[in-house]
Image (cartoon, rainbow, N blue to C red):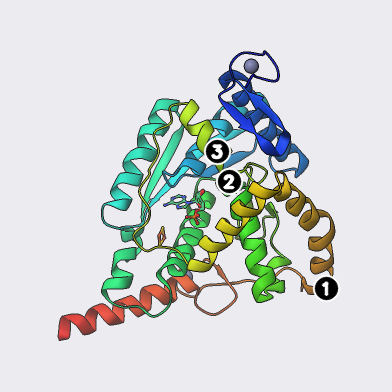
């Protein structure tokens, strides 16, 4: 197999595009696609300050590398944020790896410890807080990223969600009929008072491509899985996507375009109830649609459970 551009030996073949590339031309192709995604969805403007949320996994580190390159080309500022979730071993390794990569690139960064805000993810299972660990963890990540991005004066938060992640959420939305959530599910979430906008610059990047990019750039990333494994449904939906793509190369892009061009506009029209009117949490002052934000509610629950455990 030869590179489509220079005819040297190819290192990757992309069945969905019926093409193959050498290392240099794959990297060029990959970075151009991310740049096109940013432009197509108007994700980043000149002189903006962008927070990139780095977990230490292949997707967010690949995103860090590409955005670091593009920040010079497209004139925006980049700062990395990694949250130490307090998951034994897993969080220590993920912070170590993220830090190594920030230093290698010379990108400014902040490590935030969830523990400094009152609890760790391990506490959630230790004290048996009701609810799924992953969704409480998701709440904590969203809360801290938003809070710290605001403190840093950033205008957007970029996350490493790739094409497969995006489609999996869309399929899950169809399956369970979560149409109000889908009415807000798009590669860009605009900023609102108190809420920093979100962008997914890898939304047109298949998962395998992100992995190959990381390997070809010698990016050290975390290979360990989070011990609080995700829902079986989301894993199975990813496998289903993999199967469909194997049989019909390019189908994921078709699904993405169908969603963006045909389905999302209809769902948005019918189910978008307007921007939520947000109040300020009476405890922490962060935006919420209740008296007390979800994050503070988890904190309060844990305080109770911890003091009960001490009394026993
Ligand atoms: P996940 O929800 O774990 O699939 O992660 C989705 C995205 O959220 C990642 O690609 C990162 O951009 C971001 N993210 C996840 N975990 C962390 C973390 N511990 N610190 C900072 N960003 C994170
Ligand atoms: Fe949050 Fe696994 S990373 S529960
Ligand atoms: Zn080539
Ligand atoms: Zn709060």
Ligand 2's image quarter is bottom left
Q: Nearer the viewer, residue 114 or 230?
A: 230
What SS does tag 2 mark? strand
Residue 270, label in figure: 1
Quarter of the image for the N terminus: give it: top right
The reply to whether residue 140 is in sight is: yes
Q: Which residue is mark 3?
A: 210
Distance from label 1 to label 3 (Cα)? 35 Å
Of the image marks 2 and 3, the number of the one nearer the N terminus: 2
What SS does tag 3 mark? helix
- Crowdedness of circle 1 by 10 Å Cα count: few (<14), some, many (20+)? few
The quarter holding residue 237 reads bottom right
The quarter holding residue 265 reads bottom right
Of the image marks 2 and 1, the number of the one nearer the N terminus: 2
Q: Which residue is mark 2?
A: 158
Distance from label 2 to label 1 (Cα)? 28 Å
Spot occupied by residue 144 in the image (x, y as percentages of width and height):
46, 57
Kindly tell me whether mark 2's CB lies below 8 Å from ligand 1. Answer: yes
Instruction: Indicate which label's residue lies in the foreground, 2 or 3.
Output: 3
Of the image marks 1 and 3, the number of the one nearer the N terminus: 3
The residue at 71%/73% (across/down) is: 180
Please give left or right for residue 82 compared with residue 155 in the image: left
Quarter of the image for the C terminus: give it: bottom left
Above or below residue 73? Residue 271 is below
How many numbered marks, from 0 up? 3
Please give left or right for residue 31 compared with residue 216 in the image: right
The residue at 55%/57% (across/down) is: 239
The reply to whether residue 72 is in sight is: no
């Amino acid at each position: 197999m030869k590179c489509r551009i220079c005819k040297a030996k190819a290192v990757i073949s992309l069945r969905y595009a019926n093409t193959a590339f050498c290392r240099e031309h794959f990297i060029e192709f990959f970075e151009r696609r991310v740049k096109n995604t940013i432009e197509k969805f108007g994700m980043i403007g000149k002189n903006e300050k962008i927070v990139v949320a780095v977990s230490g996994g292949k997707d967010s580190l690949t995103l860090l590398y590409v955005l670091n390159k593009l920040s010079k080309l497209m004139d925006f500022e980049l700062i990395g944020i990694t949250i130490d979730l307090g998951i034994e071993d897993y969080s220590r390794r993920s912070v170590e790896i993220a830090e190594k990569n920030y230093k290698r690139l010379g990108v400014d960064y902040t490590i935030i410890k969830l523990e400094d805000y009152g609890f760790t993810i391990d506490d959630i299972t230790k004290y048996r807080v009701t609810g799924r660990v992953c969704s409480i963890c998701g709440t904590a990540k969203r809360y801290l990223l938003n809070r710290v991005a605001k403190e840093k004066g950033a205008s957007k938060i970029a996350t490493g969600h790739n094409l497969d992640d995006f489609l999996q959420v869309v399929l899950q939305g169809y399956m369970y009929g979560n149409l109000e959530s889908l009415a807000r599910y798009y590669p860009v979430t605009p900023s609102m008072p108190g809420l920093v906008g979100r962008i997914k610059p890898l939304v047109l990047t298949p998962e395998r491509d992100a992995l190959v990019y990381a390997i070809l750039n010698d990016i050290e990333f975390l290979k360990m899985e989070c011990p609080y494994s995700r829902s079986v449904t989301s894993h199975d939906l990813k496998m289903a996507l993999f199967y469909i793509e194997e049989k019909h190369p390019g189908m994921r892009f078709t699904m993405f375009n169908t969603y963006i061009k045909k389905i999302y506009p209809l769902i948005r029209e019918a189910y978008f109830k307007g921007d939520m009117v947000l109040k300020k949490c009476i405890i922490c002052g962060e935006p919420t649609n209740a008296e007390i934000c979800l994050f503070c509610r988890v904190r309060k629950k844990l305080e109770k459970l911890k003091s009960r455990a001490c009394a026993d």
